[in-house]
Image (spheres, rainbow, N blue to C red):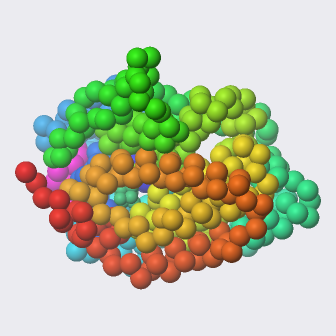
Amino acid sequence: MGPMLAAIEFMTLIKDTSALGRRLVVHLYGSLALTGRGHQTDRAIVYGFAGLHPSTLEQHQLTPLTKLFDKLEPIAFPTMPHIEFFPHRDILFHQHEWLEEHPNGLKFELQGEEGILVTETYFSIGGGFIQTKRELNAVTAAQLSPTVPFPFSNATELLTLTQDHGFTIAEIIALNEQSLRPLDLISQQLETLTSAMTHCVKRGLTATELLPGSLKLSRRASPIYKTLSDPDNTQSIEASDWLSVFALAVNEENAAGHQVVTAPTNGAAGVVPAVLMYLMDHLGYQSAESREQFFFTAGAFGSILKRNASISGAEAGCQAEIGGAAAMAAAGLCAVLGGTPEQIENAAEIALEHHLGLTCDPVHGLVQIPCIERNAFGATKAYLAAKLALHGDGRHRVSFDQCVESLKQIGADMSTKYKETSLGGLAVNVTSC
Ligand code: SF4
C-alpha cells in the first residue's frame, strides 16, 4: 500500500511541475527490493501510477493492468500519454543497497532527454504510511504542539488521562478525533472500515482459487469454514477455530492481491478483522457503539506502538506487525467486553509481550508463509490476552510501554536477515520443489 500511495503522490508532483518527461524510473532499496516481487510492490506501483487508490479500487480495474504487466508489455497512463512505462525495465530492484533513513526506501524519477527532471524519495514506514526524506527527518509540528484536547505519547499517559478525567480509553480517543473532524464523518469512516473488513472476511471464506506465486498454495479458509458451518459437524468448535478461519480468510485475500484493510499493516491485516468478526457474529456485539469502542481502543495502542517503536516488519521484524495487530485487537476486545482502562492496557501488553522476538522471514518473499497462519495465531493470542486480562484486576508487573521499549530494542538488535529481506530463517530453509 505504501509504494502504491507513493506512486500516486509522485504522479501528482509531476503534474504540478508540468515537466514533460519521457520515462518514469523507480528504484527500490533494502527490504522493498529484496521482497518487492513477492510482496507485489512492482504491481502496486503500476496501479498507483494508473491513478488507482487502495481505498476505492475494484478488482476489475486491476485486470487490464495485470495482463499488460504479465505479458511484459508497456503500460500507458491516461494522465501522462507521452510516457511509456515498462515495469520490467523501469522498476529497478537494488537488493544490496539500503537508504540510511529507513529499510523500505523507494526513489521515483521522471526522466527527459536532458536527464532527471523530477525526483522524490519516499519511505514506506508501515501501516500504509509514507514519508518523503524531508518529512522523515523532520519532527512534525503536530508532535511539538498537539492540537487534540487529550494528548498522550504513551500508555502510561493515556491511563493517567482516564484516571484524571474519568473517561474510558475509547472516550478519550473519540474526543480527540472529534477535535479534528465532525462526529458524523468519524462514524461514517468507521462504518466504511467495518464494511471493508467484513466484506474481506466473507470473500476470503468462499474463495477457492490457488494463491498466486511460486508456492502454489491452496486456500484453506474456505474448506475450514465449510466444516465449521456444517450442521452435521460433530467436532467441538472453539473460539480459536472461528478466529483462525476469519484471519486466514483475510490473509489469503491479501496474498491474492485483493483489497484488505491495512490494520496495522497488510501482512498483519487479518488479526483485527478476525477479532471484530468474532465479536460481532459470535459474541453478539452488533452495535455501532461497540464497533467504535473496539476501533478507538485498538487504534490508541497501535498509535502508541507506531510512535514509540515500529509497526513495520522491515524495521523491527514480525513482532512489530503481528505483535502490534494482536495488541490492538486484544485492547479493542477487552474494552468491548467491559474491561477497565487498566485491564485493557494489560490485554494489549500481554498480546505484545508474547510476540517479542518474532522474526520476519517470508518464504520466496511472498506474504504467505509464515504470514497467513501467523495471523491466525495473532488473533487467537489477542483473544487469550483479553480473557487473561479480564480475569485480573488490571494490576500487572510489565507495562505496555516497557513492552514497546523492549520491542524497539529487540528490533534494533535483530539481524537484517530477519527483517523482511527473505535472507534468513524459513525463507532460506524452505526450498522450492
Ligand atoms: S512474516 Fe510477519 S512481518 Fe514479515 S511479511 Fe509476514 S506478516 Fe509481515
Task: State the residue in front, 334 or 105.
Answer: 334
Specify start and end residues of the magenta stretch as a single range: 84-92
367 relative to 262 in the view: left or right: left
Residue at horizontal 28%, vertical 58%?
362
Q: Residue furthest left?
A: 433
Number of labelled discs?
0
How far across and how far down the image is residue 8, in percent? 43, 47
Residue 50 sits in quarter: top left
22 relative to 144 in the view: left or right: left
Q: Residue furthest right?
A: 165
Residue at horizontal 59%, vertical 38%?
276
Image height of 224 relative to 427, above or below: above
Does residue 7 show up? Answer: no
115 relative to 180 in the view: left or right: left
How far across and how far down the image is residue 41, in percent? 31, 52
Residue at horizontal 55%, vertical 71%?
309
Image height of 365 relative to 199, above or below: below
Magenta span contains residue 91: yes
134 relative to 423 in the view: left or right: right
